[in-house]
Image (cartoon, rainbow, N blue to C red):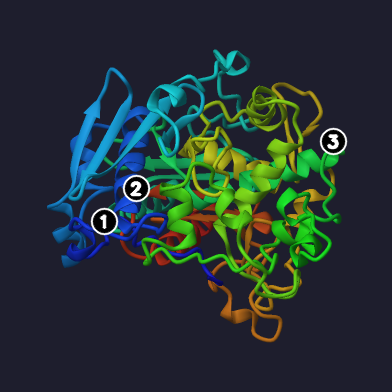
Amino acid sequence: MTGMTPRFTVALAVTAAALLPGGPGQGERDARRTVAGYAAKVTASALFVAGRDLESVRQAELKPVRPIERAALAFLELEVDEEAGSVTASLPGGVSATAVFRAGLGCAVAVDATPEALRAQAIERPEIAGWEPRPLSEPGPLSEPGPLSQTAPVDRERLEAALQGAIADGTGARAVVVLRDGSLAGEAYAEGFDAASLHAGWSMAKTITGALVGLRAAEGALDLEGPAPVAEWAGEDDPRGAIRVLDLLQMSSGLDFDEDYADLTSDATWMLFASHEAASVPRASELARAPGTAFRYSSGTTNLLQSLLRDTFEDAAAYRAWPYEALFEPAGLASIVLEADASGTYVGSSFAWMTARDWARFGQLLLDDGTVRPDGDAPRRRILPEGFVALMRTPAPASRARRYGGHVWLNLGPAAAPALRTFPRLPQDLFYLSGYEGQYVLVIPSERTVVARLGLSKTDARGSVERLAVEALAALGRD
């Protein structure tokens, strides 16, 4: 699927017939497994990663919206084992899925693995123990709104009205954060959420994976211009051998991967909720177009990149520790939980959790060209390789509408019609992260501003986040 981040309609969107005993034959994809896997995974992560309660999950993440979803919910049974850190979702016909929490790795559906084997994957993260979220810059640490380094006056009343309006507009926002010049300008939270709450970024995780690819390339372990080193594609007659790592980064691989979330047996839904290893599904995809010639948004592409990252390490422990050592700790992302699949590979397309402040902090890292300012008067420290953020912000040659770069969305619009950009009321230099159910981090370099919006939206939240950004910029004024 091309264009905007696709909407999930997987949440219990299944016909009653598909829930009855006697599903597909052996070896075929069964929609009931996807439904059970989705319910188990989403519930487990909300409970054991984000610290939510079961009733709030039933009333939000698992809330049926359409009649067909209400019918499906009647068939679903959830069993929560708090002591074991697991959730089992069951459907008629003996179909069930169990999602298991692992310390340091989040939750995964136990596909082709026992719950006990998954629990054994748990990792300690002593390298982030006791982290204190460091200020983005001085003045104005994240602990409270502070003075902003600009000469124009700030209309605090208008800014507060914009923040509270975004929370109250009925679109499901749970947290909004606005940064200006690396300082916290303001924030607001819905009832039941605060600055310490973790939020699922869904497809915003893709940009994290993109940054990790840039780091590993700078370390010499990946060649962006070289062919993607996928063993299954190494045959002389396999046209997939021509796919470059850069093609994957720019969503231009040419692979025939089905990013359809209305189809409960599509490549995307099966990959995320019914597969042992997420990358196994796109790895088996055939080539539909010549590499580099067509833009096609694909969560499978990102999970292929994560599998390539894993392959550059000698062992799983080194791979799992590396993102924290190379990116998360230096950038001060103290709250992040990057979840892995049952094989222990990070699901880089979809499963990352952070506080709203840390999602904004990651946006600030990109705004500052991959650098951070340590405490005090120390010079900036470069984290992402020089020039890589510029590469991420460069339109993929195959993205004719100039809406996508290197694992970030762009607001340039078509060259012949820039007014048709995604956010027409906001600057063209805006680039952004976007995820299912209304997750956004807008980075606006010309305004030195980052706007983060996290929540659970059953309808399109683009208008809401655009209004928030427009009002916030007006309240912050201009130098």
**Residue at point 81% right, 28% down?**
379
Element at label 2: helix
Whole-percent x, y for residue 220 in the image: 87, 39
Element at label 1: loop
Q: Nearer the viewer, residue 265 or 173?
A: 265
Would you say 102 lies left or right of 288 here?
Answer: left
Query: Which of disc 3 and disc 1 is earlier in sequence?
Result: 1
Whole-percent x, y for residue 185 in the image: 52, 42
Indicate the amino acid at tag 1.
Answer: Leu
- The reply to whether discs 1 and 3 touch (Cβ–Cβ < 8 Å) is no
Q: Nearer the viewer, residue 180 or 149?
A: 180
Element at label 3: loop
- The reply to whether discs 3 and 2 touch (Cβ–Cβ < 8 Å) is no
Judge depth for marks 1 and 3 and give the one in front.
1
Indicate the amino acid at tag 3.
Answer: Glu
Q: Quadrant of residue 84?
A: top left
Query: Which of disc 1 and disc 2 is earlier in sequence?
Result: 1
- Give the residue number, with chain letter if any, for mark 2: 38
- Give the residue number, with chain letter if any, for mark 3: 219
**Residue at point 53% right, 33% down?**
146
Whole-percent x, y for residue 83 in the image: 28, 17
Q: Residues within 10 Å of mark 2 (few under 14, many from 20)?
A: many
Indicate the amino acid at tag 2.
Answer: Tyr
Q: Is residue 181 visible?
A: no
Q: Is residue 245 visible?
A: yes
- The reply to whether discs 2 and 1 touch (Cβ–Cβ < 8 Å) is yes
Query: Which of disc 2 and disc 3 is earlier in sequence?
Result: 2
**Distance between the alpha carbons at the discs numbered 1 and 3:** 43 Å
- Give the residue number, with chain letter if any, for mark 1: 12
Would you say 49 lies left or right of 323 here?
Answer: left
**Residue at point 57% right, 32% down?**
140
Judge depth for marks 3 and 2 and give the one in front.
2
